Amino acid sequence: MRNSNSKGHELEKINEIIDNLKKISKEGFDGISDNYKQKLVYTLLNTVRARDKYKFIDSLSRVMAANMKSDKSDTFKKLAEKTAELQKVSDEIFMKYAYSIVLGIISSKNGEVNTTNINKED
Amino acid sequence: MEIEVGMQGDVSKSEIGSNLKEDTKNEKDLSLRFTGNWFVDAGILGFVNLMEEVYGDIWKSEEESKDKDFLTILQNKINENPEVIYYGYFPFGYLFYHSKLRVFYEEIRIIRKEIFGRDGINQKIAKINAEIYKLNANISKYTDEKERIKIEKKLERVKKKYRLLEEKRKNKFIEIENIRKKFNITKGEFVSCIYQITNFQEINEKKIKFLFPDFKLKFPASARNFYLFNSKETRTDPLRAYKYLSLLCQEKYEELLELIKKISPKSKKVKEGLTYELYPDSTINPFLYSPNSGNFSNLSYTLPLSIKEIKNTLKMDIPIYLLLLSFFNSFQFIGRNNVVFYTNNLEICYSINKIIRIKKEQRGGKSSLFQITWSSIIDELIEHKAKFALENMYIIEYEGIEQLKLKTVEYLGISKLQASIILDDIIRDNLNRNIQYREKTKDFKGDLWLLEEFIKGKPLYPIILNNVWLKINNKTKYFSKGASIYSLAVDAQIRKLGKNSNKLFSQDFFKDYKWIVNDIKREVQNISYTNAAFTDLFKNVEESERKKNLYELISALRSKNRSVFVNILLKILQSKKEKNRRNIIENYINENLLKQDNCWEIYALSLIIGLINYEKQ
């Protein structure tokens, strides 16, 4: 009984992180050009499919680093902290977290903000 | 031997005889009612069935019994005079049921059904008559010679068919006459003999021998053989068999032993005393303890108890042997098995089993018997508003008895959860479908009835997945969006409960599952809404691309690869521009595919169904 309780608790925690990651990544990518996001999403999806945590974190970090100076710096800082933790988690949980970040990016609003910065970094 | 003497000492001859009378005087409860023990209750149900089979028509035609159901009639008769029913009518009815005479009656009944029944000879003749009349009327209308000749030829063919049917009907009546000649009793004579049973202690030898001409007890494998019934002396002598059985029910053991001595003086029982007459075992009923358990390992609850012990425990005013012998009359042959649908209320249990028997007879082998049974059960229970009966229903079935052993016995219970769900009209209607789950071949239909699988506590997801796979590959025409979505929503909710769904006495046995029906309906709404959004996303997409996506998604799902499934889905979404619809799917992925570890596959399949539905449109 205690076991199933702790399992349930763990799942709740994971689900909370999923929501949180989706929210932060949505906030971070709101207003960024759709074309760029599309390219990034494809890259990220391919890295998750290959279960390549390192490449996923690397691709995402590049984008975030490019935006650290913008008004989104706080959000990206938060996302960067969370992303760094992805290295420690299991493949199954990594898959969940990574997809929630991608979902956040996909559901973010379209726009032209900061694309120059991003493009330069890229 | 000592035990038997002890038993006889305990219950003296006069005591046994007066037991029941005194009980009646003390206003003991004589009502037939279930005890909660399925084995005993199956005996009670079997007793009612057996009595109805033999005396049903006769008693129902009595003035005071008009418009009453058989259970009430039997109950009234027991209240009036229990001894006559238990020691007179029952032994006689039991012997009649297992005698050649009933075989004759049954043969006549079947032939009469062939003549007068639905789609019987009479109906066919009436149809042909109408056709002849129509053709005759048509001939005069045609002036064209060719057409007229054509109709005349057809008329000739139909008339020939008519003559053949007339001949067939005549032969059937002759058949009935020939069977009647074998026992040479009119119905009136039979009924008048039966009424003489009221004086069961002085049963008329002449009459009983007249009733059972060419008497030979014929036991089916399901009803086990008594030693005495098997002996030449009783097997062919109805009066001896009757006396033996009556004394056994009266528990007059001394007289029983005397009878055995008289019938068969060399019998082992004369030297060693009574055996299963006092301690019923698997000789009487294979569900009981087997004395040869070394050889035949029948499972039993306990070592054999004596009749007295059983009676004391059950505190019933009904002869125990009456229950043990009638036991198999509660079962009916459905599909390949002998089945009894048991619920802890005699009235409901009796009416359910009766309806199933009637429907089974009406439909013959035309449709799935299991489907008939379940729809009958549910209809009956809904009419009675007896949710508790379904919640407490067990199905006991066995394939047969082979070499003194029960073959494939199954005890199946409907859990409270399943009962709550199928009592809802909408959910039940949607699950009440046959679904193709394997490819159809010459000998294999490849379909399953969803409701049956659900009642058995099996998951519906694999069936729907296979059906969808067949549909995508054009290997089945049959696909029902409603049935699929309801099945998946039900499965998802059950998985969320973390139940194996077939545990009868789990921790939440006493929980009420009323709310689950609402949850399922909400889930159906959620799935349908997302489904429609997903369908819309493919509105202007080329057919080849849609099919490619469909194959990719179903393949990922079949290989249970959540990561690949979500990956493909996100790539599809990324390429679509309809923001609102995309948002709906995005939320669905987040909530149901990423967060639900137990049932993500169910939600994934629900989404795929949206693309199949598109195909249909």
Image: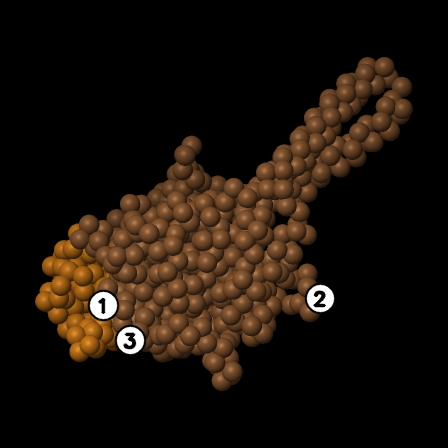
Chain colours: A orange, B brown
- Mark 3: secondary structure: loop
Q: Does the image show residue B27?
A: yes
Judge by depth and name the residue closer to the eye, B254 or B228: B254
State the image coordinates of residue B366 (x, y, percent, origin top left): 54, 43
User: Along the line of sight, which residue is nearer the eye, A54 or B299?
Assistant: B299
Q: Which of label 1 and label 3 is nearer to you?
A: 1
Amino acid carrying mark 3 in the image: Gln
In the picture, measured across the screen, residue B522 lies left or right of residue B413, that is: right
- For this view, does B217 lie left or right of residue A41? right
Instruction: Return the disc, 1 or 3, that comes first in the chain's sequence.
Output: 1
Relative height, residue B58 to residue B313 (above, below): above
Label 1 and label 3: CA atoms lie apart by 48 Å
**Which residue is at 30% across, 64% downward?**
B279
Tell me if A81 is positioned left or right of B588 in this view: left
Whole-angstrom CA distance, mark 1 to mark 2, is: 51 Å
Using the image, name the chain to which the residue with label 2 belongs.
Answer: B
Residue that appears at 32% across and 65% down = B278
The answer to whether dots 1 and 2 both sit on one chain is yes
Q: Position of residue B516 (x, y in %)?
A: 42, 72
Amino acid, disc 2: Glu
Which chain letter goes with mark 3?
Answer: B
The N terminus of chain B is located in which quarter?
A: bottom left
Q: Which mark is residue B2?
A: 1
Q: Is residue B586 visible?
A: no
Assess disc 1: are there few (<14), some (14-19) or many (≥20) residues with their C-alpha within 10 Å of its C-alpha.
Answer: few
Q: Which mark is residue B507?
A: 3
User: Residue B204's spot in the image, x, y percent?
Assistant: 56, 56
Q: Which circle, 1 or 2, is nearer the viewer?
A: 1
Name the residue tied to disc 2: B63
- Residue at 52 percent across and 64 percent down: it is B201
